[in-house]
Image: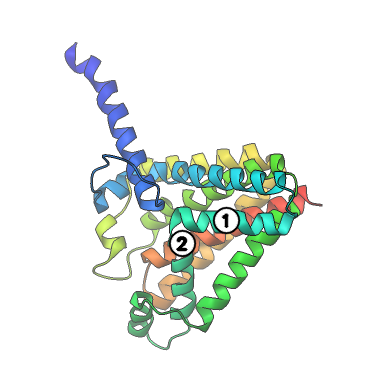
Amino acid sequence: MGVTQGSPLISLRQLAADLGAAVLFFTRLPLPGAPTISGADIARAGWAFPIAGAIVGLIAAVVYWLARAAGLPPFPSAGLTVAATLVVTGCLHEDGLADVADSFGAATRERKLEIMRDSKIGTYGVCALFVSLLLRSGALATIADPALAAPVLVAAHMAGRASMPLFMRLVPPARADGLSVSVGRPPRPSAIAAALIGIVALGVALGPAATVCAIALLAAGFGLLAWLCVRQIGGQTGDVLGALEQIGEIVILVVAAAIIGA
């Protein structure tokens, strides 16, 4: 009887620990008293990746609402909103996108991986960041109504992170060390749960037809990036996962802009 009564508490404690690990990893938000997290903690918390994204999306939605309520036009409001997400996440995913763009232009696999670890940013990286920021800000500005933009922002940040655990399971690490190796493969139930949470978020924010369109485009981006990183560097890295999030976020915002802003 004691074991039966204690199990739900242990389960809830573990779920809370997973959520805390995801928030600590994906954001710069302070969690007082939070323990240091390991790669195994991050892998186990795969299901909570989209939940951490929801927190970022909610903060973005509040910033967009405040900017529009202050009388700012849609595009400056969208720019401030995207800037707020950069602050909350510490540019984690943008850094990955820039590194991938810079590295994939190199001649050899070794050089590509070396560039990914270099803190400097090159022309390809700058251009990739510019395109990402422009598309996200422009798409959000098209959805001028903050009430309509709020669920889209939350869904974009949730679904943008929801495919990461599955990507980590399907694509092997490119290096013998680094973040992807230390994290390892998230458990299958955790990866499936993350994907399902992302799909539900899209369904709530976009509706059935737009959700099908978004999922098709996300799957195409997922497959293309998987093929490209295996071909270029032999697998995935933390930077590749950052690029995956950026692609997902852009796809969802653009689809929403096409549907809502039309």
Q: Residue furthest left?
A: 2
Residue bearing mark 2: 93
**Badge 2: how crowded within 10 Å, few (<14), some, or many (20+)?**
many
Mark 1 and mark 2: Cα distance apart in space: 10 Å
Visible residue check, residue 254: no
At which x and y percent is residue 118? 35, 78
Residue type at mark 2 is: His
**Badge 1: how crowded within 10 Å, few (<14), some, or many (20+)?**
many
- Relative horizontal placement of residue 59, taking residue 185 as reference (left or right): right
Earlier in the chain: of badge 1 and badge 2, it is 2
At which x and y percent is residue 15? 33, 33
When the figure is inspected, residue 121 is found, relative to residue 59, above or below; the finding is: below
When the figure is inspected, residue 151 is found, relative to residue 237, above or below; the finding is: above
Residue in view at x 25 percent, y 26 percent: 10
Q: Residue furthest bottom?
A: 107
When the figure is inspected, residue 85 is found, relative to residue 32, above or below; the finding is: below
Return the residue nearer the eye: 224 or 14.
14
Residue in view at x 54 percent, y 45 percent: 59
Residue in view at x 63 percent, y 53 percent: 252
Label 2 residue SS: helix
Residue type at mark 1 is: Glu
Residue bearing mark 1: 249
At which x and y percent is residue 9? 27, 22
Q: Residue furthest right?
A: 262
- Relative horizontal placement of residue 186, taking residue 160 as reference (left or right): left
Label 1 residue SS: helix
Label 1 close to label 2 by CB (< 8 Å): yes
Residue in view at x 23 percent, y 48 percent: 36
